[in-house]
């Protein structure tokens, strides 16, 4: 028996020498894939003669190797107890190293002669995978990507590596274990698993400990395990050479902890999970990243149904939706709540949802062990951060919106952008912060709650200083953007920004509009947050800077909301000028949004307050807005009176731009009163003054008035020309609502002139504009279009 080789190792050696996979040998021989796998692993050591013959024929063995294989099978049938395969320190490389161990090249067409090792126990076949989760559900796309992507690993030229990353509690390990079980049958040489405890407060698993565990599972006696990580890793790679083993490395902290545990040759596959992104593993080892996001609402519902029963979930759909919302779809949170519901079957789900609402924050997401305590799980990632990144994580909780641009983050931190970017990279790499868009950063809801708990422990002076810098960033940046889109608008005084504040600069109108558009949610939230923090001066000024953008781009509900907040701030400050500005804005917003009756109390209050502080321009604006309101409600004589009062106030203040606006309003009122001829020179004078003052928005309004005057004078061609000019200018300044109104008037002139084709195009453009800003007038323009069909 001493010269006999174990059947399994010999069969594997001969198969690899023939450069065949298990599937290929099974197809050629007619012997099942599983049977051949069992033979090679030593599960079946002595197959019947006819099976051996079929395999020998499929391998096209010469007489010597055929005899060796037959003898090994016969010996295997005589043996009753299998034992481990002898260690080999060198991997077999098909086509490079002859089976004899010689480095001389094999002759073409000849089967290399294998070295027949002494008979020894069959190899150990590890099966270390943790149990699959019985209630696993969802993640269909990720499962498909993992299973389909890894199932072909045996055909790769190097070990196939998949890297599952995501925030704490998102279900990385659950997904990895589930997919590993689906794939296990295709890797019959075993499955290795280790929890690397990369973020465990007790410390990570040392590489030497992980390697010793793997070597032990592979049947290496403790006495034969070499000292040192490098030597152990070399032995580990040698043992996996030529084998197909699935290796699951769970909870890795960085690439360095994973590298010694990677197989060195093709055939095996590796699944790694980590809260960090592990870019080194992707870049240097060809790892395929699979970032996990939150499950969608339907998958979250299915998670609850699998854990507490479909009947119970179907019976209380509203409560289930509330639970999912409070859990923010985080699988860990859903599992914790589901466990509470499952162990308290008499509890209505509505009661559990209410409990979550009343508890708030992370209090409700605790379990009997730290592994199912959301706060504890998050803390492990937080503890791994550098000091500066941990500070930034706490500060980010002070930001009031769902995401923040890097300049806002830098202002919070009181540091230059170039210093903050690496810290944000550390936070996103640890999946504690997300980057939903390039350069914008935010939190998962429960991580925000955790960060808020940490920020609450900061010194109040530090918190207030950080908030002050944040509001300075938004206020001064928004003021600069407003000056770009409304350069002739009267100014307000701003306090000097703190030196650490990052203030955005805008080279042109387009960049200002783009910034306003991107930052609108954050700017609106900042107004409310400033009031909540008691920083009222910033609140009303920030509301003022947003007015022109919100009005002209059709965000009227937001416009009204921020001005109401500004009123609260101004009253608390007892600042009549701030209160006058807020009432003036609310009055105009009411007129624009069609609730004119609400406008007059605000406008009268604003006029009184501007008179109190001696602000002539403020009084003029209030008078002009009152004129607009009276004209809107058909009180034309009163409207003309207020317009003329506004004109006098602007002239007294030396405000040329305001004078042009008031003249345009006077002309409009005279036209509505039927004084078309007298209105014409007034509006032409307004165009000249406004153009000289550089108020392009005012010029556009005056051209629109000129179109109306020409239309009233039955001069269709000049009317069309004036309206076209007004529409062009309004498009240039981004005044989309007023551009649409001009186009509606232009279309009416075209219809009157018999040009229905042109009118159809004009009204179609108007409807598109109103639809884009979600304005209800789009429907009425659609009705106009219908009259042309």
Image (tube, helix red, strand yellow):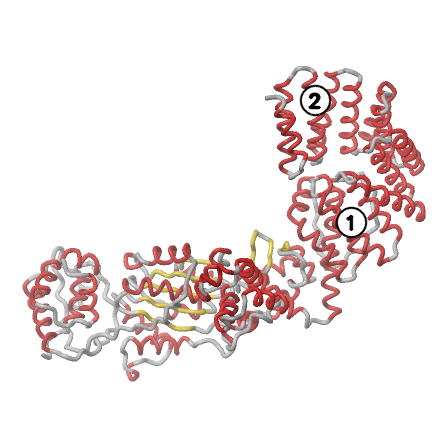
Report whether 189 appears left or right of 786.
left
Q: Is residue 433 above or below residue 261?
A: above
Secondary element under disc 2, as helix, strand or loop, is helix
Q: Name the residue under label 2.
A: 748
**What numbered label is drawn on residue 193?**
none
Tell me the mark number nearer the camera, choosing from 2 and 1.
Answer: 2
Q: Quadrant of the C terminus?
A: top right
Q: Residues within 10 Å of mark 2 (few under 14, many from 20)?
A: some
Residue drawn at x 63%, y 18% is 756
Residue 616 percent across, percent down from the top left: 92, 41
Q: Quadrant of the N terminus?
A: bottom left
Q: Name the residue under label 1.
A: 563
Residue 576 percent across, percent down from the top left: 89, 52
Secondary element under disc 1, as helix, strand or loop, is helix
Q: Which of 527 and 269 is in front in this view?
A: 527
**Does label 2 or label 1 sit earlier along the sequence?**
1
Residue 450 visible from this viewpoint: no
Residue 681 percent across, percent down from the top left: 86, 21
Q: Is residue 24 above or below residue 113?
A: above
Q: Nearer the viewer, residue 231 or 727?
A: 727
Q: Residues within 10 Å of mark 1 (few under 14, many from 20)?
A: many
Alpha carbon separation for disc pair 2 and 1? 35 Å
Are discs 2 and 1 less than 8 Å apart at CB? no
């Amino acid at each position: 028996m001493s010269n006999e080789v174990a059947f399994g190792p010999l069969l594997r050696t001969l198969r690899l020498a023939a450069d065949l996979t298990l599937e290929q040998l099974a197809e050629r021989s007619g012997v099942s894939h599983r049977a051949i796998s069992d033979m090679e692993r030593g599960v079946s050591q002595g197959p019947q003669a006819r099976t051996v013959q079929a395999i020998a024929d499929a391998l096209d063995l010469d007489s010597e190797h055929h005899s060796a294989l037959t003898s090994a099978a016969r010996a295997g049938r005589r043996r009753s107890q299998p034992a481990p395969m002898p260690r080999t320190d060198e991997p077999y490389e098909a086509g490079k190293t002859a089976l004899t161990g010689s480095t001389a090249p094999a002759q073409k067409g000849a089967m290399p002669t294998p070295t027949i090792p002494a008979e020894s126990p069959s190899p150990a076949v590890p099966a270390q995978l943790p149990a699959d989760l019985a209630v696993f559900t969802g993640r269909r796309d990720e499962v498909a990507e993992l299973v389909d992507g890894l199932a072909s690993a045996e055909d790769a030229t190097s070990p196939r590596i998949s890297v599952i990353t995501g925030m704490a509690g998102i279900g990385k390990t659950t997904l990895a274990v589930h997919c590993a079980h689906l794939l296990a049958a295709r890797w019959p040489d075993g499955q290795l698993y280790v929890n690397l405890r990369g973020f465990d407060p007790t410390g990570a698993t040392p590489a030497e400990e992980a390697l010793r565990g793997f070597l032990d599972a592979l049947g290496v006696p403790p006495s034969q395990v070499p000292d040192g990580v490098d030597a152990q890793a070399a032995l580990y790679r040698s043992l996996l050479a030529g084998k197909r083993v699935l290796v699951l490395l769970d909870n890795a902290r960085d690439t360095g902890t994973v590298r010694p545990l990677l197989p060195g040759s093709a055939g095996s596959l590796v699944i790694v999970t980590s809260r960090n992104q592990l870019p080194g593993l992707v870049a240097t080892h060809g790892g395929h990243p699979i970032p996990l996001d939150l499950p969608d609402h339907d998958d979250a519902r299915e998670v609850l149904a699998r854990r507490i029963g479909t009947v119970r979930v179907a019976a209380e759909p509203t409560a289930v939706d509330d639970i999912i919302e409070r859990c923010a779809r985080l699988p860990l949170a859903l599992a914790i709540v589901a466990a509470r519901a499952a162990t308290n079957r008499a509890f209505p789900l509505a009661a559990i949802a209410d409990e979550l609402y009343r508890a708030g924050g992370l209090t409700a997401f605790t379990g009997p062990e730290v592994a199912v305590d959301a706060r504890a799980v998050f803390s492990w990632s937080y503890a791994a951060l550098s000091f500066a990144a941990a500070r930034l994580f706490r500060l980010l909780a002070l930001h009031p919106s769902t995401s923040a641009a890097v300049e806002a983050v830098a202002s919070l931190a009181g540091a230059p952008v170039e210093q903050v970017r690496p810290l944000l990279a550390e936070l996103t790499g640890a999946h504690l912060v997300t980057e939903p868009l390039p350069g914008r950063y935010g939190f998962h809801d429960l991580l925000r709650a955790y960060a808020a708990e940490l920020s609450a422990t900061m010194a109040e002076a530090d918190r207030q200083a950080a908030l002050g810098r944040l509001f300075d960033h938004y206020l001064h940046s928004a003021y600069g953007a407003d000056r770009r889109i409304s350069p002739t608008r009267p100014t307000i005084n701003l306090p000097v920004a703190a030196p650490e504040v990052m203030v955005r600069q805008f080279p042109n109108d387009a960049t200002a509009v783009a910034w306003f558009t991107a930052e609108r949610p954050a700017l609106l939230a900042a107004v409310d947050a400033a009031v909540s923090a008691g920083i009222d001066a910033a609140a009303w000024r920030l509301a003022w800077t947003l007015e022109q953008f919100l009005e002209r781009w059709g965000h009227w509900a937001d416009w009204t909301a921020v001005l109401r907040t500004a009123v609260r701030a101004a009253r608390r400050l007892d600042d009549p000028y701030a209160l006058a500005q807020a009432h003036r804005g609310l009055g105009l917003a009411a007129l624009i949004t069609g609730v004119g009756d609400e406008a007059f109390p605000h406008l009268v209050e604003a006029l009184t307050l501007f008179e109190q502080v001696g602000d002539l321009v403020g009084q003029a604006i209030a008078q002009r807005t009152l004129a607009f309101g009276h004209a809107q409600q058909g009180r034309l004589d009163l409207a003309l009176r207020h317009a003329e009062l506004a004109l006098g106030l602007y002239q007294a203040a030396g405000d040329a731009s305001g004078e042009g606006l008031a003249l345009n309003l006077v002309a409009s009122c005279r036209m509505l009163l039927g004084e078309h001829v007298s209105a014409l020179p007034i509006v032409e004078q307004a165009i000249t003054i406004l153009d000289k003052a550089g108020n392009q928005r005012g010029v556009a309004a005056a051209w629109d008035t000129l179109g109306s005057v020409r239309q009233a004078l039955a001069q269709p061609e000049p009317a069309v020309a004036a309206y076209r000019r007004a529409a062009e200018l309004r498009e240039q300044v981004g005044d989309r609502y007023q551009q649409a109104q001009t186009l509606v008037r232009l279309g009416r002139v075209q219809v009157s002139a018999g040009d229905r084709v042109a009118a159809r195009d004009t009204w179609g453009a108007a409807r598109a504009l109103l639809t884009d800003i979600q304005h209800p007038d789009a429907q009425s323009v659609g009705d106009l279009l219908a009259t042309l069909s």
